[in-house]
Image (cartoon, rainbow, N blue to C red):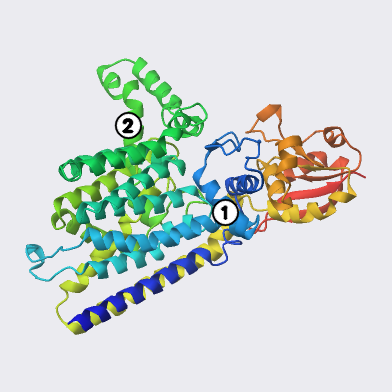
Amino acid sequence: MAIFITNKKKIIFFCLGLIILLAAFLRFYNISKVPVSLYWDEAASTYNAYSIALTGKDEYGTPFPLLFRSFDDYKASGNIYLTAVAVSLFGLNEFSARFTSALAGTLTVLLTFYLVKDLLMDTNLEDFKLFKRKFTINNEIIALISSFILAISPWHIQFSRTGFEANVAVAINVAAIWLFMRYIRFKKSWLFIISMFLFALNFYFYRSIWVFSPLFLIGIFIIFFQELSAKKRIIITIVGIFVFTTVLAPFIPVMFSSRGMTRASQVDVFSNSTQQQIQAANRRAQGGIVNKIIYNQRLVVPEIIFTNYISNFSPQFLFISGDSNGRHGPRGMGLLYIWEIPFILLGLYFIIFKIKKKYKLVFFLWLLTAPLPAAVSTPNPHALRDLNILPLPQILTGVGLYLVYQLIKQIFFKRIFIITMTVIIVGFFVNYLYLYYTVTARITAADWADGYKQLTEYMIPRENEYQKLVVSGHYWQPYIYFLFYKKYNPVLYQKYGNKTAFGKYVFGGTEWDKEQGRSELDNVNLQEFAGAKHILVALSPQEYAADKSQLHYLKSIYNHAGQIVFIVGNTQ
């Protein structure tokens, strides 16, 4: 018997190892080139990581900030500091920009195995009368299936292959919850202390955690109040809360500062519902009891929040079309595979009626609080702000698949089920890979600011031939790409550079980013703007059409969709 158990464990861990290798391959393979370009936040975070690694300061010369000013959106610092390690190891490049997220995504697949394994421990179906079948749940098999589904999940792969700090936050969140649940089960004090440390640390990584984690923590403390307040555990509970408070304390003033709330004020429904409130006021002013009830201005924001919340559970969003933002998912499909629907529903039924009550409450607390950050912001639905919900859909799918297999009595039909599901899963997965690497890469090129790298590859080698180089700001924040691809010395930039100019480079603005009064470079005297006669100029097609009389055409810069992004010319 002991030999049988040992062999079974070896098989489980062998399969887990294969799943982790698959997850790593899908997250690391060709990440420098797919997605087709670093979008501006990736470039900014990585250059700031480079600056931190070399000087201990961000691009503005601020020593070790807790929020990075960047584009005046004050980015969370956690992922930037981790990226600084990657930059130190691999240099300033696309791989470093995405390494931390890819690694975190791979680790999340591993953590999901252990989370599910503990969540479903000692669960059986002997009184699950609906199915008229008696069998014991194998929590390790379900954990393997759940990890595999997460490994091939379009939603998770999408954010694991780019420098989204939210993906690192997901890994930390899963680890914190898993350690908390293990503490409840096994009563080892270090598990609770590390869990509290991770819950606090996660606030430094992504803003949606600022909404999700406090609500989730309050919830699990209420659910497990008896265990946490028991005489033998109360000291550990106090120590854990102290650790949590100590880690979070330096960040609390920053969170609630004007800088910390900058991004929230840009996207929250409270600041972005003015138009709806005006419309409600106008309809209410028309008179009538019905108008007064329906078009109550006080109900506008709650209605928006409720609608946003529900939209993040929409089948259209989850299974059909996904997020409208081209950076947030493959085109032509949803965030989850459509074949998962029946298994997710069966998994939900199982969670509701079968697992232990307190674990069930934790599961639904997690499921229902995860979309709240997306619900109180715009636009909606939003795959990135809803990312905290992972890996719950994959766990439900894993449970559902296992249950269907166990409910089939005959070996022959079990084999048919395995073959059928293998064909379905492989078919959908291959289609996803085609959509991701071929269709999506082309369609979403503009969403990734594709064209900047091609432009830098043309302009940087020629900079010694000109007095100044002028770059359009039509596509927003061009300076960060030239800092990134030139590997420009952060010390020099901190002393002498800014968003408008550094070294030989001068940058235009955009119509929708009127920072410092800058706007498009159409109908501008380019030599006067540059402060030099002999200049190399890169403009958007619109700007070039207006300024072509001033320039000699040299080259058109295309993105991967075959669109002209920049036209380069020089003064004659």
Q: Position of residue 565 (x, y in %)?
A: 70, 50
Residues at marks 2 and 1, CA–CA distance in whole angstroms: 44 Å
Whether residues under marks 2 and 1 lie with C-beta atoms below 8 angstroms apart, the answer is: no
Front-most of residues 518 and 251: 251
Figure quadrant of residue 340? bottom left
Mark in front: 2 vs 1? 1
The image quadrant where one finds the C terminus is top right
The image quadrant where one finds the N terminus is bottom left
Q: Disc 2 residue type?
A: Glu
Looking at the image, residue 75 sits to the left or right of residue 206; the answer is: right
The residue carrying mark 2 is 303
In the image, which disc is placed on residue 480?
Answer: none
Q: Secondary structure at mark 1?
A: helix
Looking at the image, residue 63 sits to the left or right of residue 341; the answer is: right
Q: Is residue 73 above or below residue 10?
A: above
Q: Position of residue 210 (x, y in %)?
A: 39, 38
Q: Secondary structure at mark 2?
A: helix
Q: Position of residue 484 (x, y in %)?
A: 68, 49
Front-most of residues 147 and 271: 147
The residue at the point 31 percent across, 15 percent down is 287
For disc 1, the neighbor class at 10 Å (few under 14, some 14 to 19, many from 20) is some
Q: Earlier in the sequence, mark 2 or mark 1?
A: 1
Front-most of residues 434 and 11: 11
In the image, which disc is placed on residue 85?
Answer: 1
The residue at the point 70 percent across, 40 percent down is 473
Q: Disc 1 residue type?
A: Val
Looking at the image, residue 439 sits to the left or right of residue 393; the answer is: right
